[in-house]
Every structure is written in C-alpha cells, then in structure tokens.
Image: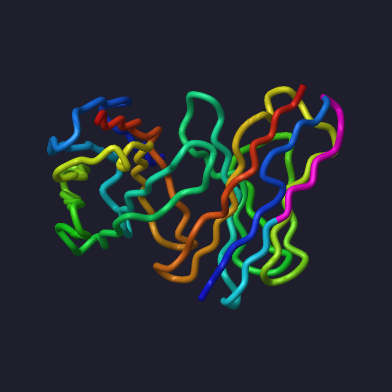
Amino acid sequence: SQTIHQWPATLVQPVGSPLSLECTVEGTSNPNLYWYRQAAGRGLQLLFYSVGIGQISSEVPQNLSASRPQDRQFILSSKKLLLSDSGFYLCAWSVGDEGSFGQGTRLTVV
Amino acid sequence: KQEVTQIPAALSVPEGENLVLNCSFTDSAIYNLQWFRQDPGKGLTSLLLIQSSQREQTSGRLNASLDKSSGRSTLYIAASQPGDSATYLCAVSQGGSEKLVFGKGTKLTVNP
C-alpha cells in the first residue's frame, strides 16, 4: 500500500532563515506530487505540483520554491523565510483517483 | 478561476443529530469532487470521492451528493457522534494533473 511521509511535524524558524521541508512517497511510481499551505483563517492553497522528476509548476508567486530530485521525493524550500510564510504545509500525492496527504508541518516564523 | 465556498463556516450540534454541510463551486466543469476530514494539526483524510458523472456516494453514516450543473455538493452526516468533530473540507478537481481547489472548510463540533 502507498504511504506518504512528511517531516518535520513542527518547526519554528527565525525570519530570514532557510527552510527545507521534505516529503517522500512509498508504494507507487510516478505519482503527481503537491505542496499545499493552509494559512490561519484561510483554505488550503496549492503552492506547487509536479508530474515528474524535475518538473515543477508554481501556482502562486511567493518566497518559496520546490524541487523533485527523485520520483517519490518532493522538497519545499526557501532561502529566507518571511513572517507571512507561517502556516500549515501539507504534501500530497496522487495517481489517477488515488492519493493521500501527509500529516503536515506546522511552520511558525518568528 | 474555480472558487469553492463552504457554508456554514462552523457548526455545533448535539450528539445524535443529523446534519448537512454545504459546498458550492463556480465552474461546473469538474473532474471530481472530494470531501475530506481534517483533525486539528493533522493531515487530511479522504471521506468520499464523487466522479463528475455520479450523483452521490455513501460510506457508513456519510452521504455526499453532487449536482454538477448547479455547482453544489452536500455532505450528510447521520446520527452525529462526538468523534465526528473535525473540520470538513470540500475540494474539486478539474482534471489534468488532478489539482485540487479547496473550500475553507466547515468546523463541526458534536457535543455529547
């Protein structure tokens, strides 16, 4: 069966520091991968999606970037965090109608 | 641009009550619609998936309906329990890479 791992679960980072959140999927091949963000009082917003290695599409202009170095690995990064980057970040995978979400990372930028 | 709206934003009911959560979307050209459950600080759990050609899906005490032409879906929860307390999210996919557009959710509290 497919599983998705996302870490860390919580993170507190100072403004201006770098960020790296990692997501890996097991039990499937060539999944679509997604990064979503849920900011306080707002719905889930798609940040990036990837249909294959090295293929990244950005949905919202922002201070973040994503990379897919391997088929089942998706990384969310920032060179310098802003206060507005605080939120709950969710990674997800899908293949056809199958898919699931990671447990999320609560990022607080202070 | 697809927009998804969920009403109400929050709902508090006594245990045992039947309830309905509403979801509407602006572009009826959807591939499918999903209802998710989110517990505080956790990821999402998919509850029901309705394909664009379907009218409803049922799982246990949950029933979701879809009226694509009017851009509406409802999630019916029968005989609610305190364990049903969570935020319920509606999301639509418009195909392609199956990107999901989410509503802001309905926060449900079921009081014992």
Examine the image and state in which quarter residue A83 appears: top right
Residue at 59%, 60% (x, y): give it.
A33
Residue displayed at 24% across by 60% down: B52
Closer to the camera in the image, A55 or B35: B35
Residue B67, percent from left and from top: 16, 49
**In the rendered picture of this protein, how many numbered marks are placed on residues?**
0
Relative to A106, A63 lies left or right: right
Q: Is residue B41 magenta?
A: no
Position of residue B36 in the picture relative to residue A11 (left or right) = left
- The x and y percentages for residue B34 are 33, 53
Quarter of the image with the C terminus of chain B is top left
Query: Percent from the top left, x then y, of residue A6?
Result: 65, 54
What colour scheme does the image use? Answer: rainbow
B16 in relation to A49, above or below: above
Res B95 quadrant in image: bottom left
Q: Which residue lies furthest to the front in this view?
A: B112
Using the image, determine if residue B19 lies above or below residue B53. above
Residue A78 placed where, x, y %? 79, 40
Seen at 84% across and 33% down, the residue is A80
Q: Is residue A19 magenta?
A: yes
Q: Nearer the viewer, residue A79 or B63?
A: B63
Q: What stretch is highlighted in magenta?
A: A15-22
Quarter of the image where the N terminus of chain B is located: top left
Q: Is residue B42 above or below residue A51?
A: above
Residue sitting at x 73%, y 62% = A68
